[in-house]
C-alpha cells in the first residue's frame, strides 16, 4: 500500500489538469483551502476566496481530506484521505514548487495534521496498522517534509489533531476504530472500540491528559476538533452503534476538566444523523459550527452557554471555516459555497465539488 515519492510525483505529472471555472488570480479578502473532486473524477487542492472563486490549484492522485495551515504563513499541506499515504505541501506565496511526500512503510495518513507554532515541524495523524496503534508522524518542512520521527498518539484510530493553545501540546481525537489498508474503509473492532481525547506533549510524546466516554458510549468515535476563544476544545462525534440510539454528538472540554456533552435539542441532534463531519470556531471563538454531510445540516452553538443559536440546511454540506467579520463559510459536494453570518447569508454556486474540509488561509 505504500506509495513512494518517485511514484507520487510521476502520478501527479500524468494526471490531466482538473478543469476549473471562475479563476480569480486577484482574489481579495479571506482565502481558503479545500480538497475538491471534479465532474471527470479528478482530484485537486484548490485555494479560493469567500465566494468560491478559485485562484490556485494543484492536482492530487486521489482524494485529499484536510489541510494543515502553517501559522507562520508559509505552508499549506493537504493529506490523503484515509488510508492514503501521500501528502502535498504548497507554498502559500507560490514562491517555490509544490512538495510531494509520503508515509514510510506500515504507516498511512489519517487525513489531518498540524504545524508547530513556528512552522518548523509538521505533525500528522497516522495509523501504524500492523501494530494496531495510532501515531503522530513528525516532518521537517525545511528538509522537503522529510519524516524525522514519530510520537505515540496514546490510542487507536487517530483522526483529527490540532495544536493546543499553549503551543506545547497536541490535542488528539482518537476515534477508537481499528482499521487496516487491506480493508480500506472497514471498521474492524466496533464491539471493542476505545475512543479518547488526549493531550500529547509534542516534544516528548508524553501523555498529559486523557478522557474517554462512559462505557455506554464506547461506540462514539471522536473525530473532529476546534478550540474556542477561551481555550476550550469542542469535539464532534460519529456514532457506530444502534441506529435508533439517541446519543450526544458534540462535547466540550476545558483544560483539566471533565468531558462535557452538549445538550442539543432533540430535533437538531437527530438531524446530524449520528455523523459530525467537521467542526470550526468563528473568528472571535464565541461560536462553534458543526456540520453533517449525512444529515445535510450545519448547527451553530454559543460557546459560553452551550446553546444552539442557529442552524442551516445544506445538502452534502461538510466544509466549514470562519468568515469575516463573523459567522462561517460552508461548502458542499454539490458546489455550493454559503457565507452564513449574523448580518445575513450569501449563496454562491460553483462547479467545484468541495470535499470534506475547508481551512482558512
Image (spheres, helix red, strand yellow):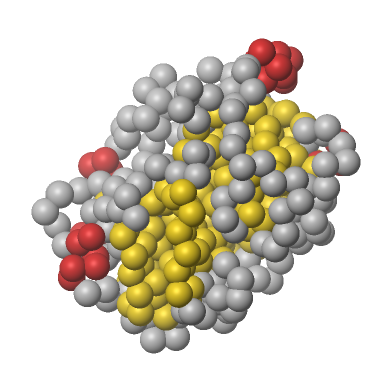
308, above or below 249, in the image: below
Image point 71% across, 17% down: which residue?
13
Image point 39% across, 51% down: which residue?
317
Q: As drawn, is 3 to the left or to the right of 6?
A: left
223, above or below 45, in the image: below
Count of marks, rendered view: 0
Q: As drawn, is 115 to the left or to the right of 21?
A: right
Image point 11% across, 54% down: which residue?
244
Task: Give coordinates of residue 334: x percent, y percent.
Answer: 40, 42
Residue most extreme to the left: 244
Instruction: Kindly indicate the quadrant of the structure image that contains residue 105.
Output: top right
Q: As drawn, is 89 to the left or to the right of 19?
A: right
Asked whether residue 210 appears in the rendered view, the answer is: no
150, above or below 299, in the image: above
Task: Give coordinates of residue 167: x percent, y percent.
Answer: 71, 66
In-front residue for pair 204/302: 302
Image point 40% across, 63% down: which residue?
290
Amino acid at each position: 500500500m505504500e506509495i513512494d515519492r518517485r511514484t507520487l510525483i510521476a502520478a501527479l505529472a500524468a494526471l490531466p489538469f482538473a478543469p476549473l471555472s471562475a479563476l480569480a488570480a486577484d482574489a481579495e479578502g479571506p482565502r481558503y483551502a479545500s480538497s475538491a473532486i471534479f465532474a471527470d473524477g479528478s482530484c485537486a487542492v484548490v485555494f479560493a476566496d469567500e465566494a468560491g472563486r478559485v485562484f490556485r490549484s494543484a492536482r492530487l492522485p486521489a482524494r485529499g481530506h484536510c489541510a494543515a495551515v502553517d501559522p507562520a504563513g508559509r505552508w499549506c499541506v493537504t493529506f490523503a484521505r484515509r488510508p492514503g499515504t501521500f501528502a502535498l505541501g504548497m507554498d502559500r506565496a507560490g514562491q517555490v514548487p509544490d512538495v510531494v511526500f509520503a508515509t514510510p512503510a506500515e504507516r498511512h495518513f489519517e487525513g489531518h495534521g498540524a504545524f508547530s507554532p513556528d512552522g518548523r515541524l509538521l505533525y500528522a495523524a497516522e495509523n501504524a496498522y500492523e501494530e494496531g496503534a495510532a501515531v503522530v508522524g513528525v516532518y521537517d518542512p525545511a528538509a522537503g517534509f522529510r519524516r524525522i520521527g514519530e510520537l505515540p498518539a496514546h490510542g487507536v484510530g487517530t483522526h483529527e489533531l490540532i495544536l493546543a493553545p499553549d503551543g506545547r501540546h497536541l490535542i488528539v481525537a482518537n476515534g477508537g476504530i481499528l482499521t487496516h489498508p487491506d480493508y480500506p474503509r472497514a471498521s474492524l473492532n466496533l464491539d471493542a472500540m476505545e475512543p479518547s481525547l488526549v493531550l500529547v506533549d509534542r516534544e516528548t510524546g508524553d501523555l498529559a491528559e486523557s478522557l474517554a466516554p462512559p462505557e455506554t458510549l464506547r461506540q462514539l468515535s471522536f473525530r473532529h476538533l476546534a478550540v474556542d476563544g477561551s481555550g476550550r476544545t469542542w469535539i464532534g462525534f460519529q456514532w457506530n452503534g444502534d441506529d435508533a440510539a439517541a446519543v450526544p454528538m458534540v462535547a466540550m472540554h476545558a483544560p483539566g476538566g471533565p468531558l462535557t456533552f452538549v445538550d442539543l435539542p432533540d430535533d437538531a441532534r437527530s438531524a446530524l444523523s449520528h455523523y459530525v463531519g467537521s467542526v470550526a470556531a468563528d473568528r472571535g471563538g464565541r461560536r462553534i459550527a458543526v456540520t453533517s454531510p449525512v444529515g445535510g445540516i450545519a448547527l451553530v452553538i454559543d460557546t459560553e452557554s452551550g446553546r444552539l443559536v442557529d442552524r442551516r440546511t445544506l445538502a452534502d454540506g461538510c466544509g466549514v471555516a470562519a468568515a469575516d467579520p463573523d459567522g462561517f463559510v460552508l461548502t458542499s459536494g454539490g458546489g455550493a459555497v454559503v457565507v452564513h453570518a449574523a448580518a445575513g447569508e450569501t449563496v454562491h454556486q460553483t462547479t467545484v465539488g468541495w470535499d470534506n474540509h475547508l481551512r482558512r488561509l
